[in-house]
Amino acid sequence: MTVTATKRAATGTLTGLALGDALGFPAEFDDVPSILAKCGPWREMPLPRPAIVTDDTQMTLALGRALRTALERGPLTPESLEGPLREEFVAWYRSPENNRAPGNTCLRACSLLADRDRAWQDASQVGSKGCGANMRVAPLGLVPGLGDEQRAGAAQFQAALTHGHPTALAASDLTAHAVRLLAEGAEPSGLVGLLRSYAYDNRTRYHEAWLGDLWTRTQDPSPEHFIARGWDECLEILRRLQDAVRTVSAETDPCLATGEGWIAEEALATGLLCFLLFVDEPLTALRRAACTSGDSDSIACLTGAFAGALLGADAWPAEWAERIEYRQELTALGQLWDTPASAG
């Protein structure tokens, strides 16, 4: 399958991600009753004015810019991506706009990445599997012309620069794969099964070219043992997700079924759950994701990415899309990756 330019999946994904981020931002640290008291019925949640995003969108753009820079220089490799991505992450860390309650893991790792003489593996926080690893990975599901090995390796690599826990790597790989499948037109009803098969197939595959000796920073006896720990946790949450899709009421907090989303595998699963509950109603999916007891902005940004990948740019009403923060840059990257000529 190939991504069709007509639906503009890349533009739809990035717009949906940012809209979910902005919708969930005011609700991030509230429980559901507090959100309802502040916003009214969840199915009618308005997009805030102004539609300000968080570090989720900021770091997605950082990855997108780094990918654009790397690909302008030739094929995507660990060597071509490391420099631009490191620069973008450090620039985000130092930016005055980095004031949206960013995660401590990203802050700590990016401060260490600023030392150019430090191996990135020594900056990686190998004990952290926070959702910061995969909230930003969607661009790797959208860039045309990448092979499966490049996409998977780069998805894990971008996570590992900050979050070195194997579950963060596996969840990021799965998130990018889900975006790619949906952009290519995969049937949503079969998506969880496809992700589980992908996890089984990759369970002991350590991308050494991309990750180097990262695994030696842990107590694991081998790289295969290291990465299998991450895939096994993702397989467990995917089993819970498969059950939840069949049994959960749309009126209950999705976090009760698949977790609050502060950690990578739960953010993936709960974001997918909200998307799958309302496949044909993207705004309702975003609102359900934003009205949750957990990491509402990250859950909603992933939900928006999945919905936008499947439905394309027209999924989002112009009145919302036109006033999202960073609109111009989101649109520019989307147009770049929606253009077949950009494949290489």
Image (cartoon, helix red, strand yellow):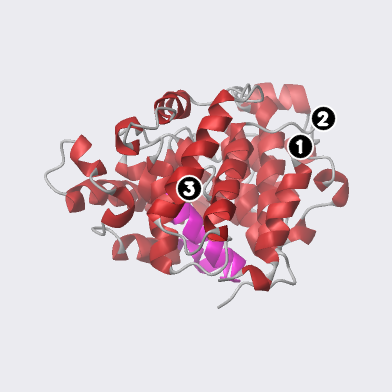
Is there a contact, CB below 8 Å, between mark 1 and mark 3?
no
For disc 1, the neighbor class at 10 Å (few under 14, some 14 to 19, many from 20) is: some
| Depicted 335 relative to depicted 163: above or below | below
Q: Residue at x 63, y 39 (%)?
A: 57
SS category of the residue bearing label 1 = loop
Is there a contact, CB below 8 Å, between mark 2 and mark 1?
yes
Range covered by the magenta-colored residues: 171-192
**Location of residue 193 (image quadrant):** bottom left
- Residue at the disc numbered 1: 325
- Residue at the disc numbered 2: 50
Residue 78 percent location from the top left of the image:
39, 53
- Residue at the disc numbered 3: 269
Residue 1 percent location from the top left of the image:
55, 78
**Location of residue 53 (image quadrant):** top right
What's the amino acid at mark 3? Answer: Ala
SS category of the residue bearing label 3 = helix
Choose between 21 and 68: the one closer to the eye: 68
- 1 or 3: mark nearer the eye: 1
